[in-house]
């Protein structure tokens, strides 16, 4: 540490990738003496880690910045300095415009610059402001501080690990290829080392994340490119890691080997987020998804042949330019054909700079809202049916934290539903069999199966070498 203790507050908006990035920013700043605090009020540095994928994200950031400016003024009147930084995809997209609109901001940096954070802070302190939204030629994964066991401690039993970033798919509605840049995969050995640290700190479940995670092709310890399937098989061997997940996948990158991993790896949980966006071939083509409805249904069939109880979730966009009532009907029929355990659905929002924003036939707001409502009802029916099928079933729950009521814990089913059950606090971080006794729309309630021997958390064993 080279300075006095300073307080850092990072607020994440948007996806899990941002949550993970926020943690990594905190790890990068720890050697500079920064310690995370739970509130912005007493912080010396506030970072807003922003998301740009849908509408209003930028507006939310500006209104948050207005609040922070008042906090900065209040701090200044006490002789304290509050440094305000904006990171993430809004920073990447808006760049200097952010400082122009809100001069209280000291630092703006995009997702490719996190490893340069200490240097950028020094630059902001010296020059008053710093902006860094370049896409560097070097690979940002190579510079990120590898988290230490101390840094990963106290972050719960379930962790996200970024394995891949960026996207080369260029769906016509999406800003990710512009804000996150080209696809880059992290070397397998770095991922394994990070997961071994996490396991040693008590983590039992790891979700490998990336914008296009199943396009993973990082360098393996054998200097060859490893596929996601290969990586998953190796991660499954890390002592202490009982559960694996990965997100978000593109249907086109669901290869045979990855499908086989769903059959072979009992650590790989039977739940998969596989966004389809639309059920209409015409709209899928306009979206440049590069798969048809039939391709998607074929992947779903092969996955379910490999893992019959697989729970599927998806993302949908309604009101993409040119979407007719019959295109939308095709989306509704896809929902009932697949039978999802849940899904996210969004009104199409034109993102500046994407091809969709310049397309004719933009759909009016009222039609979008009306379709969204009908789609959400269809998804809710799917989800309720899925949850009802769980009634009376027994499955393993990984308990994460105290539940809503005294004596209860909440954990996750293999299918990712939250499960509440009466259980001793010592079981946090442990896996136990629970019989489902009641279902609600978003969570399940259960009882520890009689006679089931709870597997309490084990101190994880670090394997010798990877
Ligand atoms: N408008 C609406 N939804 C979008 N998404 C991405 N871009 C847009 C957009 N321009 C949704 C997609 C994606 C999810 C993360 O966000 O459904 O899968
Ligand atoms: Fe965006 Fe499409 Fe890439 Fe997903 S696959 S990040 S929706 S461009």
Image: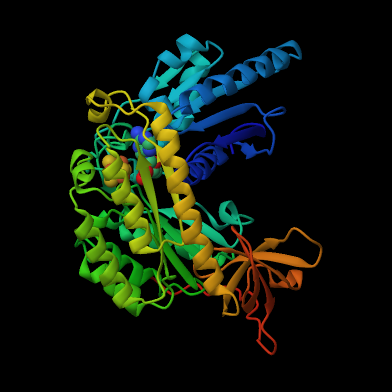
Within the image, what quadrant is residue 361 found in? Answer: top left
Residue situated furthest right in the rendering: 406
Residue situated furthest bottom in the rendering: 451
| Residue 395 screen position, x and y as percent | 56, 78
Front residue of 291/33: it is: 291
| Residue 440 screen position, x and y as percent | 63, 62
Q: Number of numbered discs present?
A: 0
**Which quadrant: the N terminus?**
top right
Asked if residue 104 is positioned above or below residue 273 in the image, the reply reads above
Residue situated furthest front in the rendering: 325
Asked if residue 63 is positioned above or below residue 382 in the image, the reply reads above
Residue appearing at x 46%, y 31% in the figure: 117
Is residue 382 visible in the rendered image? The answer is yes
Is residue 166 visible in the rendered image? The answer is no
Question: Is 126 displayed left or right of 247 in the figure?
Answer: right
Within the image, what quadrant is residue 233 found in? Answer: bottom left
Asked if residue 48 is positioned above or below residue 317 in the image, the reply reads above
Front residue of 62/120: it is: 62
Residue appearing at x 52%, y 17% in the figure: 106
Asked if residue 357 is positioned above or below residue 432 in the image, the reply reads above
Within the image, what quadrant is residue 460 found in? Answer: bottom right
Front residue of 181/146: it is: 181
| Residue 108 screen position, x and y as percent | 45, 22
Applied colour scheme: rainbow
Residue appearing at x 35%, y 63% in the figure: 338
Q: Which corner quadrant of the figure contains ligand 2?
A: top left
Residue appearing at x 54%, y 67% in the figure: 387
**Which quadrant: the C terminus?**
bottom left
| Residue 68 screen position, x and y as percent | 63, 20
Question: Is 124 displayed left or right of 455 in the figure?
Answer: left
């Amino acid at each position: 540490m080279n300075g006095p203790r300073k307080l850092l507050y990072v607020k994440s908006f948007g996806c899990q990738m941002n949550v993970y990035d926020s943690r990594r920013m905190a790890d990068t700043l720890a050697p500079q003496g920064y310690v995370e605090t739970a509130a912005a009020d007493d912080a010396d540095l506030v970072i807003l880690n922003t998301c740009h994928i849908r509408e209003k994200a930028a507006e939310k950031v500006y209104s948050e910045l207005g609040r922070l400016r008042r906090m900065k003024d209040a701090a200044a009147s006490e002789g304290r300095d509050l440094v305000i930084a904006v990171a993430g995809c809004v920073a990447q997209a808006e760049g200097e415009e952010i400082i122009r609109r809100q001069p209280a901001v000291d630092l703006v940096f995009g997702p490719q610059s996190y490893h340069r954070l200490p240097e950028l802070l020094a630059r902001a302190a010296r020059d008053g402001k710093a902006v860094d939204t370049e896409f560097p030629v070097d690979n940002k994964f190579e510079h990120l501080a590898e988290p230490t066991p101390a840094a990963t401690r106290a972050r719960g039993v379930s962790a996200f690990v970024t394995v891949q970033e960026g996207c080369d798919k260029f769906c016509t509605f999406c800003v990710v290829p512009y804000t996150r840049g080209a696809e880059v995969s992290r070397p397998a050995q770095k991922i394994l080392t990070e997961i071994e640290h996490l396991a040693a700190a008590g983590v039992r479940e790891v979700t490998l994340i990336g914008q296009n995670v199943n396009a993973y092709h990082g360098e393996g310890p054998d200097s060859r490119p490893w596929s996601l399937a290969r990586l998953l098989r190796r991660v499954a061997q890390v002592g202490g890691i009982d559960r694996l997940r990965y997100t978000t996948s593109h249907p086109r990158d669901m290869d045979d080997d990855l499908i086989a991993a769903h059959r072979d790896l009992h650590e790989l949980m039977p739940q998969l987020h596989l966004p389809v966006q639309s059920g209409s071939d015409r709209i899928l083509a306009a979206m440049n998804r590069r798969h048809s409805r039939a391709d998607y249904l074929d992947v779903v069939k092969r996955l379910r042949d490999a893992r019959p109880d697989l729970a599927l979730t998806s993302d949908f966009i309604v009101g993409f330019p040119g979407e007719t009532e019959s295109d939308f009907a095709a989306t509704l029929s896809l929902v009932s054909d697949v039978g999802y355990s849940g899904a996210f659905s969004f009104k199409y929002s034109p993102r500046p700079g994407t091809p969709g924003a310049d397309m004719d036939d933009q759909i009016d707001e009222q039609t979008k809202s009306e379709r969204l409502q009908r789609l959400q009802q269809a998804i809710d029916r799917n989800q309720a049916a899925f949850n009802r099928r769980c009634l009376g079933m027994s499955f393993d729950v990984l308990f994460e934290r105290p539940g809503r009521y005294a004596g209860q814990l909440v954990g996750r089913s293999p299918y990712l539903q939250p499960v509440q059950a009466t259980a001793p606090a010592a079981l946090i971080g442990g896996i136990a069999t629970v019989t489902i006794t009641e279902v609600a729309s978003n969570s399940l309630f259960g009882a520890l199966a009689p006679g089931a021997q709870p597997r309490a958390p084990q101190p994880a064993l670090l394997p010798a070498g990877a």
